[in-house]
Image (cartoon, coloured by chain):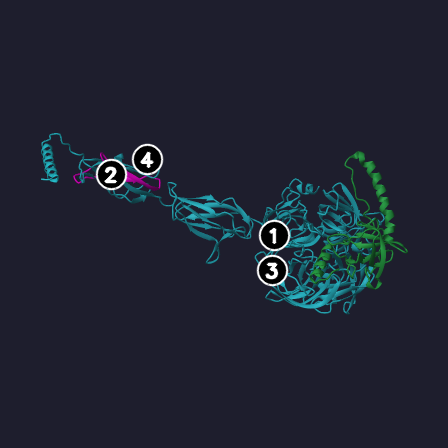
Chain colours: A green, B cyan
Amino acid sequence: MTTRTNCFRVWTYRMQRWAAVLAFTSIAVVALLTPMQAQTRAAETRLARPYYDLTREVTHKATVSSVLTKPSAGMIVGSHLLLATASGEVDASLGRWGLQGKSALSVSAGEPVGVMLMGRQVFVVRTVKVRGQVFAMRNEHGIPVSPQARERASQESAQKGESL
Amino acid sequence: MNRKAYASILGSVCLALAFLTGCGSSTATTPPPVIAITATSGSGQSVTVGAAFTNVLVATVTSNGSPASGVTVTFAAPASGASGAFAGGVNTAMTNASGVAMSVAFTANTTAGAYVVSATATGATTPASFSLTNTAGSPATITAVSGSGQSTAASAPFAFPLTALVADGYSNPVSGAAVTFTCPAGSSAGCSFTNAQGPPTATEMVATGADGIASATPTANTGTGGYTVTAAAAGIAAPADFSVTNISSTTYVFYLSGADTRPTSHGGYNFYALAGTVTIDGNGNVLGGEQDYNDANGVTSPAGGDRIVSGTLIFVSDLPAPDDFGQGTLFLNTTNQSMGGGGTEVFAIQFVNNNHALVTQYDGTATSSGSMDVSTRSGTAITGGGYAFTLSGVDSGYNPAALGGVFTISSAGLSLQNGLVDTNDDGKVTTQVGFSAEASATDSFGRGTITGIGIGNTPVSLVYYIVGPEVMRIIDVDTSDSLVGSAFGQGTSAGTFTNASLGSSVFGLTGNSRVSGSDALGQFSTSNTSSNPADFLGVADANELAKGISPVLAAPISGTYSIPSGDGYGSLNITSGNLGDVTTLGIYLTDPSLNLSDPNNPSGGGGALVLDLDDVMAGVTGVLVPQTDITAADFNGNYAAGWQDFNNFNSDCTLCEFDIVAQGPAMGTASNAFNFAGFVSDPFFTIPVLGPSYFNGTPLADPVNRGRYSMLHANVPSNPLMVTVGPVFADFDVVIYQANAGQLFWLEVDEAVFFGALEQQGSLNGLPAARKPPAKTQLKKKE
């Protein structure tokens, strides 16, 4: 079984002119190296199944040190919060749509948040509470909440006179 | 005496003088006589062209009201057109003592029509008029005026009537002539005439109008080719011939699901489903159809669906079949301006054979994967028997959902009974819930409705399109939820399924476009099939990209399965931890003779529809296909491929979808075995630049797990699938599983995920005529 997990390593433009072939090759080699280095990190941050286990869920209060709308190399797809904790900075995955769409989570570096999450090296976040408001990133099964689903849930809550 | 008396006397004197003076005058004059001429007889006659009128023309001349004798009367006929001639050219006559003048015999000329002959006399200010008519002679000729040379699709009426002109020997139109139009007898290509009083007939009799024209509109039969329709009239030896052609047409049913780009507040990435039917003639012209589109987020076809009114199927190659490779684009013009670009949808299409194609929407508004299959339906009801079904999409909360199960169609064809349904709605799993439902009869397009099925407790409105006696495509047409899938018949196996019905199999699972990457692919063999549960053992790969779980490669899998009753409803449990999150599957067995990918294909049949019942795998469905040929040498030939790809290439659109259809030679034993070319549909601009797309590689047969192939960086030598899209290239780690020589599945197992089918191409000789492509405008459009 292969251990390679990042085979889509290069998307680059093939040079249109023969004169650029050499330069292209050099760039490609460099580009190849970068994700291969990141590959180790990616492997380390992979999750073991089951993907989301409510019994292993924990609640943390932390301070946001960075908001990543796009994942860095090796990270789980989607947006992330880097949280400052007593044990250091941890990567909290918000999922594919965590920061997207109407009424999405809006949070800045330096803000305190409460998160319900699960994981070890990398954490997958189910909810984020910031400024007293709770935002759902995933449901109880770990399925990401889409902007459409978030909006519909919001409308349903509004109709019931509830607030998040 | 007063003044009045004097005036009276004076007036009387003057009056008397005046009288006397007048009587004595010698210069008084006589007024001229009043001459008049009238038509006495002969007017109003009609006679056949070229014949003498029965009666001569008679005029009477009077002078001051008395007969005027010796007066010359001149008769004058029109100089041209319908007219006639007097015998010997004598056109004058003298009145007799009675004032009567009679013409000599008057003979009609050869031109039919009404006209006036005048009669004049010296002194008469107004001529007499004789209204005469030359009537057409007997039918002598019949000629085809219009309608010849046209063509129509088999079974369709011709667009224009066949028009024949009946004329006499002088080319005058003959009114009221009975013309008999006749379709050829005993010809494979032919026609008939509709008959309100009964079944269609081979002949139709029509009387000519005043213009000599008779017309009739035949309807083509199912045969194709050219033939002659005749129009004959009594007394005419040679009929008129109309050369017409029946061209082939084919009705297809298509269904797709993917992601659309509708400009919403949600980033324009919605799940959507599309199903419909379209008829295309042998020249690639779309004759009509119907469809339902539903993204459950603002774009849903109205009740009754959208009409497809026209369009074109254009092939990339203009080579004649069989050299054509069945790749092209299909343009559908709909009545719904929300569809595609201004109502026109474009699909990239890759035919596998004459009856089956892989398709993706290709117009920049949406991308999807699906198939298009020849419809062989007849009648308006669903064929009775057992069915298995799965549907996948989003629920009313826009969360991923899928359901699957079995039901029985009553012999009446409209009642779904004995239903059992499993549901995975956003991780909420329910199983073995009973249901019954009702279907409507189909409309003329083969479209009907089903009510009584729901996502959990939420009922959904379903529309079905009949592909054939045992196959329906089903789509949810509610505005808040969207599902799409199929129902397949169970044939004579309905009611008799057991654990032994499942043997060595290839299975594939794929998450819908809302899930974007929870796929698995594997194979297994079964054992202890007389026990319940029975056992299986195999190997599988999985890619749960969306969750950040490492791809699982060539993982040994084992577990149990159970098909407890004869209705084909069962379950399969993979030992936890073998295959990522995939553990519990609902399986719904189908007719062993029915090919689930290519339902008109008589080989490669059997298997089951599959629903993932793991809570984290909502929206995941698939198929399970008998594995009957794992010989690598048999994986050899031209293959069509289609796949649905989710990736992170565009970090602004994480896990966004693009879809591909392609074709080329492939084999499981030689180097450079894949050499595919195809279309990439990428409305989310995942790939920086689009252009001609090529896919090359060399599958490595797995020596341990026969039937499995891999194209991986990690292989020695490294053999990933190389992809070139325009000026961009990439490589993919891919695994392939062979169900049989004609049917394989492949799964990308790296940091993108795709799942799709590889299907060996068959005959393409029956495809609509190939046409030249529109100068690559489709490709340039996205550049």
What mark, if any, has residue B278 been given in the picture? 1
Type of the residue with mark 3: Gly
Discs 1 and 3 carry the same chain letter = yes
Q: SS for tag 2?
A: loop
Residue B59, quarter of the rendered image: top left
Sequence-first tag of 2 and 1: 2
Cα separation, mark 1 vs mark 3, equals 15 Å
Cα separation, mark 2 vs mark 1, equals 73 Å
Type of the residue with mark 4: Ala
Sequence-first tag of 3 and 2: 2
Q: Chain of mark 2?
A: B
The reply to whether the C-beta atoms of the residues labelled 1 and 4 are less than 8 Å apart is no
The reply to whether the C-beta atoms of the residues labelled 3 and 2 are less than 8 Å apart is no
Q: Chain of mark 3?
A: B
Work out which residue is located at the far right of the displayed protein and give it.
A87
The residue identified by callout 2 is: B104
The reply to whether the C-beta atoms of the residues labelled 1 and 3 are less than 8 Å apart is no
Type of the residue with mark 1: Val
The residue identified by callout 3 is: B448
- The number of numbered discs placed on residues in the rendered structure image is 4
Which is in the foreground here, disc 1 or disc 3?
3
Residues rendered magenta in the picture: B95-123
Q: Is residue B724 depicted above or below A106 in this figure? A: above
Q: Is residue B608 visible?
A: no
Q: Is residue B382 depicted above or below A1 in this figure? A: below
Discs 2 and 1 carry the same chain letter = yes
Which is in the foreground here, disc 3 or disc 2?
3
B553 sits left or right of B743 in the view: right
